[in-house]
Image: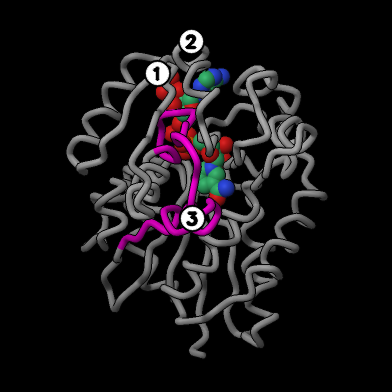
Amino acid sequence: MKPGLLGVIGHPISHSVSPQMVNTALRHAGVDNILYIPVEVKPRDLEAFCRSAPLMNFIGFNVTIPHKVSIIKHLSRLDSSARQVGAVNVVKVVGDKLVGFNTDVLGVMSSIPSEVDGPVLVLGVGGAARAAAVALKRKGFEDLVFAGRRMKTVKEFEKFAESRGIRCRFVKMGSATMAEELRRCGLLINATPVGMYPKINETPLKTSFLHRRMTVFDMVYNPPKTRLLRAAKAIGAETVDGVKMLAAQGAEALKIWLGLEADRQVMERAALSALKGFRG
Ligand code: NAP
């Protein structure tokens, strides 16, 4: 393997567990001449970073908050997943050009069951919910409901879904209609940050709405066992945590950058161990 750099850019970036997760996967695969580093990039420095990445021998990098959409104007090309979601979480350096991808879609696809009895209810209408919408459509799910908090972002999501041919309904977060959808729902996806460190005692909905016929997938990965997932497990529902998605999207990125089939179990364990040491 040719030596070079990989990394993750964001602001702030010190909380990221990706360096530990990806470096462990690289060493496990016997790759010891590629290093994955966190790079603090403020919004005003994004263009300068993109221009210099090929000169600094970057093979590629992950993109996180707040650059997932704003980076698009600095890229030469987007692959179909990034075009569909309208956001980029992986960039590959090709010569002096940058190409954008979105591996969150495959991350969601590999975290959810293939079949679901009842509608799929997604909490949130932000970036992660968009990746979920594209993933659910690709998996062939047709009965999709999205719960939004503010009218403005629901309207934006509605436009997004329409332009991608994703048919779905909308309910207001916490409403009686949402409670009704919950009763029938076979898969519940939390695509809000509610429950994330440091507010680990919060849940996006009253846990009395959960039932054992549903699978509950929480995209929040810090902590891995959120209050929502603990409550779902306690009543006998299937649960999937955000670390599984984190490892899956990370493994897809390694495939794009290096053609490497990384060991996802190793990545999950490394992310869990990094999260244990996390103190904010
Ligand atoms: P985002 O674009 O900011 O969207 C967040 C959504 O949650 C918005 O619809 C927002 O509502 C809603 N929301 C925020 N706080 C809320 C609250 N207190 N009550 C109800 N709704 C609330 O964020 P994102 O990028 O989609 O990320 C969402 C979560 O997914 C984060 O925890 C992130 O870490 C996680 N994630 C995990 C992975 C993984 O690999 N596991 C990958 C991507 C994202 P408004 O529209 O009204 O603001």
Tell me the kind of residue under disc 3: Ser
Residue interval drawn in magenta: 100-129
What distance separates the C-alpha of mark 1 from that of mark 2? 7 Å
**SS under mark 3:** loop
Query: In the picture shown, does residue 142 fall above or below 90?
Result: above
Dot 3, crowdedness within 10 Å: few (<14), some or many (≥20)?
A: few
Q: Mark 1 points at which residue?
A: 171
Tell me the kind of residue under disc 2: Ser
Tell me the kind of residue under disc 1: Val
Q: Name the residue under label 3.
A: 114
What distance separates the C-alpha of mark 3 from that of mark 1? 24 Å
**Where residue 92 appears, x then y in whole percent?**
37, 69
- Please tell me which residue lies in front, 206 or 10: 206
**SS under mark 1:** strand
Instruction: Say if mark 1 contacts mark 2, CB within 8 Å.
Output: yes
**Where residue 230 appears, x then y in whole percent?**
77, 35
Q: Mark 3 or mark 1, which has the lower sequence index?
A: 3
Asked if residue 264 lies in the magenta stretch, the reply is: no
